[in-house]
Image (cartoon, rainbow, N blue to C red):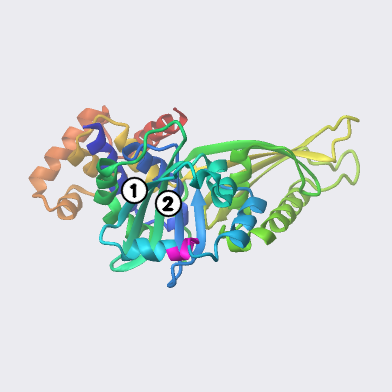
Amino acid sequence: MTRARDVAFVREICRVGLPARTLVQSLLPALRTIVPSHSAGVFWVDERGGMRSLYAERMLPPDAMARYHERHAATFDGFADAFRRRAAATSPVSWYSFTAAEQRSDYFRDVMRPLDAYHVLYGIARDGTRPVAQVSFYRGAGDAPFDAKVAATLSSVLRYLGPALAREPASSAADTDGIVAEEALGVVARNGDPIAVSEAWSRMLRLVALSSVSPGGARREAAIVRDFVTDLVGTMLPLRAGPSEAVETATRTLDTPWGRHTVRAWRLPDARGRRDDQVGLLLRREEPRAVALVRGTGASELSPKQREVALLLAQGRSNPEIAASLGLTVNTASYHVKQVFARLGVNDRGDIAALLLQLAQQAAAR
């Protein structure tokens, strides 16, 4: 039952219509509930199979990513050639465990060991017949290898992943009014240099500062991110012009290709008590409302059909509109609406969305 609910969540968030880079941050944790692994990544490709952008829950630092590109990406076993072979294979899913000899190679030392990626599962996502991305899942040295059973699970959802991962940003603003899904705190110097930062903070900052992440652009990435932080800090917390003019804290909302992020900045004293040399930056990523509503239905006690009805109610649909959307009679749709009210303990349609968002926030906090 749990697996069916998890698969349904993956299917529903793929259908919400959000751009791929906004969606992927919620999609990968959902996929890992049905494909057990410590982390996962999505690698978008061009028409030749070359990597044009990526998102991974564990990312190599920019210098390590640049070394990978320079030492390994152009070899026969580089990403593009490996992707083309997988895309041409009979099955869209494959898995591999590195041998003891391979674990001594430069490639494994440079790329896979830092990610604790001793076992890998690959899925080729297609939009129609066109390969658009590779989804990769990783297990560590102490984990069991992937097998045919988990490969079959991934294969069963690839038909939803392809169109979702091919979706580009629309010209209008994306649906971003959701819940706080992730946050991390770092301390930086005013010139953009990190002072005390975590891996999670660094990953989030890269997404805030960059429209895309790829090994080919990694050499330029550090300078771009540093300049971004310098400009951000300078505009949010300008240097003091006088005691009465100093801004101690500031908050800014940034809409990026990776979704909506909120940045809170405040001055921090250094060892000498000065408050202009270093800054605290709290980064928060919001999960879009459309995804949060789906997460809320998954955290409820609703049946699969009731979850579909609840989502439509949260969108403000009438009973006839719900019936038409789900291929039901109006009487049957009305029956399901009453059941949703009873299961959720609400009496008004306007309360559905608020309750689902509350359930989603509780689920995200766990």
Q: Which residue is found at the position 40% from the left and 60% from the top?
A: 133
Decide: few, some or many residues near mark 2? Use Cα within 10 Å; few <14, some 14-19, many ≥20.
many
- Asked if the magenta segment contains residue 53, the reply would be no
**Image location of residue 41, percent across then percent down:** 46, 49
Q: Which mark is residue 23?
A: 2
Q: Nearer the viewer, residue 276 or 108?
A: 108
Decide: few, some or many residues near mark 1? Use Cα within 10 Å; few <14, some 14-19, many ≥20.
many
The Cα atoms of the two marked residues, 1 and 2, are separated by 8 Å
Query: For the image shown, how many numbered marks are present on the structure?
Result: 2
Identify the residue position indicated by label 1 in the image: 13
Q: Quadrant of residue 201?
A: top right
Q: Quadrant of the N terminus?
A: top left
The magenta region covers 77-81
**Secondary element at image label 1:** helix
Q: Quadrant of the C terminus?
A: top left
Q: Amino acid at mark 2?
A: Leu
Q: Amino acid at mark 1?
A: Ile
Q: Which residue is found at the position 64% from the left and 58% from the top?
A: 218
**Image location of residue 233, percent across then percent down:** 75, 48
